[in-house]
Amino acid sequence: MSEERKSLNFIEQIIEEDLANGMPKGNLRFRFPPEPNGYLHIGHTKAIGISFGLGEYYNAPVNLRFDDTNPAKEEQEFVDAIKEDIAWLGYTWDKELFSSDYFQQLYDWAVYLIKEGKAYVDSQSSEAMAEQKGTPTQFGVDGPYRNRSIEENLNLFECMKAGEFDGGEHILRAKIDMQHTNMLMRDPIMYRVLKKHHHRTANDWCIYPMYDWTHGESDYIEQISHSLCSLEFKPHRELYDWFLDQVVDAGKLRPKQREFARLNLSYTIMSKRKLLKLVEDGIVNGWDDPRMPTISGLRRRGYTPNSIRKFVETVGVAKRDNIIDVSLLEFCIREDLNKTAPRVMAVLDPVKLVITNYPEDKVEWLDAENNQEDESAGYRKVPFSSELYIEKEDFKEEASAKFFRLKLGGEVRLKNAYIIKAESVLKDVNGNIEEIHCTYSEDTSRRVKGTLHWVSIEQAVKAEVREYDRLFSDETPDSHQDKSFMEFINPNSLKTIEAFVEPSLKDAKIGDRFQFQRLGYFNVDDDSTLEHLVFNKTVGLRDTWAKVKPKQNTNQNQQKQPQQNNRSAIEQIKSYGKKYDRLPEDKQADAKVDIQELAQKVSYDEVEPLFNTSVKKSGTRIITMITLGVLLKNGLEKNDAITEFIAKALDDKNVLLVAEAAAIS
């Protein structure tokens, strides 16, 4: 959690108020309590980030407590995976604990409640219990076993513990109020019979506590100061407090439950039950499939801990649920990898290019910059010869003046190499181009508009590339009442191709990340070997989904759309200038994505006049710097005006402007 935040979120305000009202700072303790019944996903990273982030901010301990009260679904595999994921994100916990550590204490407290007349054994069927519990608009009624004697309840509960009953025959309920307006307070279940092997306690127990009974009491045992939950647990807070009322010692710290909005992501499923179905039905290849929103899947796809933590921090802490556009997550990994990933050349859909005036037996090893964003990254050598591969889509026999790649009679620059001119083509019997014949020029000082990536055929290394797309084609796949989320599976979410990469990658190790120039960011998959390289596509260089998103079909939007389309890209960018530096962080991130997308359609001549913007108009200067960064990334060369504009920005007092300037200086 960054210490540069401009304001406290509402949870931090609660903590600050508690400290101001006399709570010793040394009493602060937080926890992250996952259930080990599946792998953690991107939605969990918000809860992880909040609890561990508060721990870092306040220098307070954070417990990792596994809520292992349902042995029917929990496994040691999930415990190990959760620990690996949290450690990979860069967080450390103070104590590793389990709800099963407290089974005896929870049982003893349950016996105490029975003796106090506050709990009883119910022997109704689940259907009968549901009926007598009522509805949100109709009060419940007392069940036939509610007034059993304390002696009978103690005896039945002991028999439940001894394994004398089967599941469903009896349960233990708290005795609260069947007419309560909060249905959770209408005699909630505390224990049920479940004759399953537990991954830690083996067969020691055949009754297991329910979440609501376990949660608050475990927090109390561990002396958690602030128990932070997602919003769906807000109605449970009253029950949380009632259970604590029964056991809390006045001399000990009493936990406080508070709720925040959970993280929902577009084009994504967050239910572990539904994610398990994807695994079991073979839609994906396991929990760590790079298309899965699990942390292990994101890790395998090439996401970095820093990008995920930045994403969570950007989303922030809110009190209302909303859906975050997945493009923000993709933006965060682009930003991170742009700074750190080495640039290399790979061709995914090759066509042969022959340079007819280059010696056939000659091989040059040319210098190639590893990462222009990192001065310390240095250079590498790439081989150049008379026979190369380029991308098929980078050549057209005939093309318009707006096609800045290779065409017959046209010139382009080969990245890190020479300028070439297409002279002729060779085709097969079906008219498909087999070879492009070119000539090259050693005069590399000339300006040409297009730059292509390439690999030398003789030295190229074959590699399998797995191009991943979003797993679902619908923005909210599990929000349709009349359709299953499975109906929105994207059939083209995985495309496997044979590619050719430059020889510097032949020793790439599992997990290494690269930018394939002009194509996107890729990493070495777990399946990769020295004999068979496998790369996963992490994310493209730009958000291509923004262009295909369906427009909202409302009259209001239909009226506004033509006006938006008629505005030039530079005018749309300038419209952000008045408000950019006053936007909240999440809106700012969205705006930056829009500006960078629009900047692809802007020329330098349109941007240069903005260099003279008044110092007071910091927002306009920031959006100009963002736009300039895109142009420079796309091959624009720095001149005196650009250098002067960046230098002035670096001396400015506006931290956002300085950060954008530093990124391209």
Image: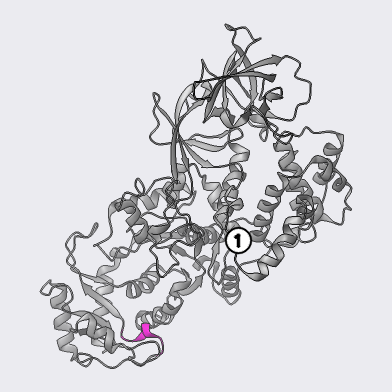
Q: How many marks?
A: 1
**Residue at (25% x, 75% y) in the render:** 191
Q: Residue furthest left?
A: 164
Is residue 587 part of the magenta span, yes or no? no
Magenta highlight range: 181-187
Along the horizontal axis of the image, is 70 left or right of 162?
right
Q: Position of residue 374 (x, y in %)?
A: 66, 34
Q: Quadrant of the N terminus?
A: bottom right
Place of residue 426 in the rendered image (x, y in percent of width and height, measured from the top left): 57, 18
Q: On screen, 353 above or below 65?
A: above
Going by the numbered disc 1, the residue's amino acid type is Lys
Q: Position of residue 229 (x, y in %)?
A: 46, 69
* Residue 55 position within the rendered picture, expressed as x and y whole percent measured from the top left: 52, 59
Residue 42 or residue 91, whichever sits in front? 42
> Residue under circle 1?
551
Quarter containing the C terminus = top right
